[in-house]
Image: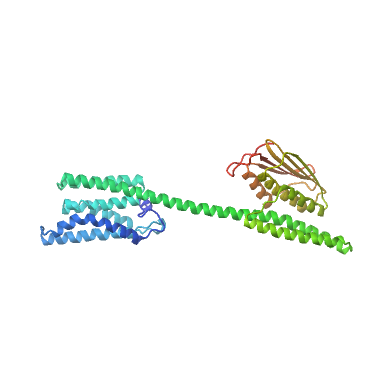
Amino acid sequence: MSWFSRTFTFGAMDARSSRWRRLIGVMFGLVYLFYPVIGIVNGKMPFAEAAWQVVALAAFVVTYVTTVLTASDDEDERNPLTVPLLGVLTAMAAGYPLVFGAGWLALPIYVTVIFSMGLPPRAALPAVGGMALIVVVVGLVKGADKGTLSLLVMEVLTLGLLFMGVRNTRLLVFQVRQAQKEVARLAANEERLRISRDLHDLLGHSLSLIVLKSELARRLAEQGDERAVQEVADIESVARQALVEVREAVTGYRQRSLSEEIDGARSALAAAGVELTVRTSGTPLPDVLDGLLGWAVREAVTNVVRHARATRCEITLTYGKAGALLEVADNGVSGPYQPGSGLTGLMERVGAAGGSVEAEPAAAGFRLRIVVPRQPAMPEAGQPVPV
């Protein structure tokens, strides 16, 4: 397909535009056929010549209307007849005035409108200029009145520029609508990602704790220990809390504080037989960092419970002028690791705040280190800020 056929689009690319509405609009432009019609019906020419002009005029109108109806705003649905019809229409607009006289010089105006509405500016400008040149040359050849000739040239140029502006305006409207759809799509994707990330973090932690407490309750029950009843009650409490948190995550209202997550970490690690030590220093965290680091503690402790087989865990938090530093280290199994979806989601959260995440095996166990600036950056930022 040629460049011309790829770029020609009548009606300015609005997917909702109707061919029939376009046709109604362009029919008003047929007023410019007044001049050739007057020449035909004034009775000053032989009948045979008048008949030929009627046939020629009807052919032009049919070609013009067909060009409008076959043109499509959709690149994939464009009719292959559109470009040949436009070529025939252009030939008619240039040839009829030479054959039938200066009264037909209004025909290039129709082609000008289609070029202006269908081509990008860099192609439409030369096309409009070509139509104006045709009017001048044919008018001079046929001896048209200079005043009428000047008026027709002005109409070609002004209507060409006007409809180019109309096309560009409608194109901008179309692009704005497309951008709005894209924004809505991205927002929906981001919301789905948020929900899936939150559900993973929430359920991963809660279900791990439920499994641990269920195993403990079973062992205690087998031994006839009354503490089994308390463990079962804890399981019920954790399950109920998980249900609440899932609902909050889906509705977008969930925000657990760092202190709540540390309390939950104590319970989960205690059930797994892991001793927890917490060290904090500095001023209180702002809400944004408090929630972010709360997620980090939840993810880190969940991994300790699931994979580390540790006996000790340390959480260290400092917050000062440069920002916040959170470290979670255990003395469990060390070695190569593959980041899972939970750690990947945590990296996305911290990266969106302009921070950085380091997760690596330590001399004995595993260490997660998170650095976040004092003023969390917008998502498009992303350089880590040292503490």
Q: Quadrant of residue 374?
A: top right
Q: Which of 89 and 221 is in front in this view?
A: 221
**In the figure, 369 relative to 114: above or below?**
above
**In the figure, 253 relative to 218: above or below?**
above
Circle count = 0
Figure quadrant of the C terminus: top right
Residue 340 visible? The answer is no
Q: Determine the residue positioned at 71% across, 50% down.
A: 299
Position of 52 with respect to 236 (left or right) is left
Q: Where is residue 26 in the image (x, y as percent from the top left)?
A: 29, 57
Position of 198 with respect to 67 (left or right) is right
Q: Determine the residue positioned at 42% across, 52% down.
A: 174
Colouring chosen for the image of the structure: rainbow
Q: Quadrant of residue 84?
A: bottom left
Q: Position of residue 5 (x, y in %)?
A: 36, 53
Q: Where is residue 32 in the image (x, y as percent from the top left)?
A: 23, 54
Residue 358 visible? The answer is yes
Position of 277 with respect to 73 (left or right) is right
Q: Where is residue 339 in the image (x, y as percent from the top left)?
A: 69, 49
Q: Determine the residue positioned at 79% across, 48% down.
A: 333
Q: Which of 58 and 247 is in front in this view?
A: 247
